[in-house]
Amino acid sequence: DADNLARRYFGDEFGDKIPWKRLDDDDDDSRDDDSRDDKAKAKAAKKKAPPSHKKKEDATAMDLLRLLRRETDKRREPSWRHRSAVFVEALERDGESLELRGWVKHGALRRSRLLHVPAAGAAVVAAVQLGDDVVVQCGDDAEEPLDVAAVPDTLAGEQNLWDDDEEDQKDDGSEDDADEQKKSTKKKKKKSFFQSEFQAAWGLDAENDSDAENDDDADEDDEMAEVSEETGAEEKRRRYEEELEFPDEVETPEDRPARERFARYRYLESARSSPWDPYESLPRDYARVFALNPDYQTARKQVLKEGSRREEPPLAPEAARVSLRVSTRDPSSARRAEELFRERGFLVCPSLHRHENRLSVLHCLVKASDDDDARHLGDSSEQAAESAPVQSKDVMRVKVGHRSWLARPVYSSPALAGKRHKFDKFLAKGDHRVASFYGPVSFGPAPVFLFRADDDATPVATGTLVDVDPNRLVLKRVVLTGVPARSHKRKAVVKHMFHDPDDVRYFKPAQLTTKHGLSANILEPLGTHGHFKVALNRPLNQADTFLLSLYKRVFPKLPKSDSSGGGKHHHHQEDDEKNAGSVAALVDSIV
């Protein structure tokens, strides 16, 4: 042990160049010299020996090629491409059917999946032929129909349902029983699909709710009329700069009571934690969308797991040349696909997972392109600077994964905590926002590109798909402002927030705040011009401003039938039926 310690200490202090020698043993010198020579010879032989591989000694040329490809090519295809697709080299149209000839890539072609044909939408594979083999008929094996949107039952919203026992009791004829039945039916009246819990409790009809919804849409159109596309880029930029300087601030109209103008808004004590029912006062368009159960991530995992564990025999293996006969929705869809094929010379038709032909609300995290991105994409800095800002509910062409369609998205700021997301009127350059819009369900990860409806060359925003959920709350905030007319200690008189004392009484339960962080409660109105007294928690600075924040939920819009698309293969509405529905405009714009 002492000898080993001494050797270790000697080597650390003087290195390996000075040999270790004990005075009491003369033979150790020769043994150390021999061991050093053996180590030097082994090290030199190891350096001169060429690299060898156990598997390469008996490997064939193909094995060496596979090994070289595996070791050198480390690239992976995006995960959103991992679905079978058909590369179409020839196309013929026969009414609403299409004859496609090409080869299969990215996996085997499954029997029960729909096929997405560009410019025609989803199609059912009716027959498949591999080379000169027998034609396989498979039109009845599709998991889902070609209908994208749900069909709402409009009569269900007008019916009041009772139990069968109560109907039998009505025939008894006694007046006392009739009075009791009236009371019981009032309690057991069920709310319609378009009614909220509040409206069902107070017996409000769905027709009245729809009238209020139409009034709300008219008010919103009046708000955004001055910043619409017809007013030009200059007016829109002016409104955008005004929004940056005074965010969410609006003026109370003098010719209309504030309690009517902001009837659809509500005061929230806490925008993050105050209760809000996601099924309350839904628009009629929500009767045609689907919701994934229980949520998007769980449904995505289940669908992808089912796709990887299919036990049914495939229709066509990967890299096989096939001839397909597919059935589209109508002859106009097949005609658009034929025109697109003539223009491009080829088509790529990917298969669809389960639920991917269902209409829902998609949410994508996008980044607006700034000047550097515009120059990188070929747009000059002058054109990028002169372009009008992107506004919520503008008609855009969105491309999610392998499909694109027309949409009118709303933009919101992603919330770090909670489920409430603040609505943004504009999409500023370089900002990260969540774009919410109607569209067919897509399972990510999938890249997202947003183009203007009249320019499909340069994207205005890029991002990725994050969620598919119609119940995501996007809240629009409006701020009513007032200035102190006079103040004394912790009391003040506020003016210019309302113009009617009845409005002051209507908004009296709401709590006011100031730009300097004070809180105030409305006490009573003064006079006939909308002035009112407030009580503050601290003495007020005369230069401060009073704020009243009101919120309402906003929803994306469906594109109109007369919206201009980004190409000449979109919106061939020749029938009056197509012009009547906006869902048809979205479906016809899918590419």
Image (cartoon, grey):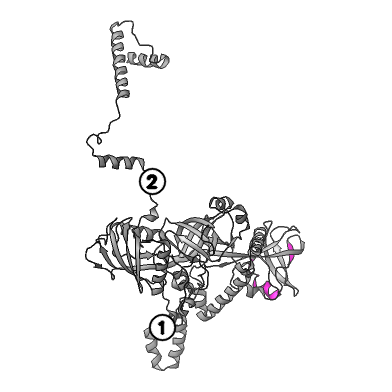
Pinpoint residue 376: horizontal percent, then vertical percent: 54, 50
The C terminus: image quadrant: bottom left
Secondary structure beneath label 1: loop
Question: Badge 1: how crowded within 10 Å, few (<14), some, or many (20+)?
Answer: some
Q: Quadrant of residue 54?
A: top left
Q: Is residue 174 above or below residue 543?
A: below
**Residue 500: in magenta span:** yes
Q: Which residue is mark 2?
A: 75
Amino acid of disc 2 = Arg
Mark-to-mark CA distance, 2 and 1: 64 Å
* For residue 515, side relative to residue 560 (left or right): right
- Quarter of the N terminus within the rendering: top left
Residues shaded magenta = 491-510
Q: Residue 507's x, y, as percent?
A: 65, 70
Check residue 259 for magenta coloring: no
**Label of residue 263 in the image:** none
Residue at 62% from the left image edge and 69% from the top image edge: 230
Q: Secondary structure at mark 2?
A: loop
Q: Amino acid at mark 1?
A: Trp
Which residue is painted at 46% across and 86% down in the image?
182
Q: Residue 298: give x, y in percent of width and height.
A: 38, 59
Residue 496 falls in image quadrant = bottom right
Most foreground residue, 405 or 367: 405
Is 271 situated left or right of 167 in this image?
right
**Which label was assigned to residue 162?**
1
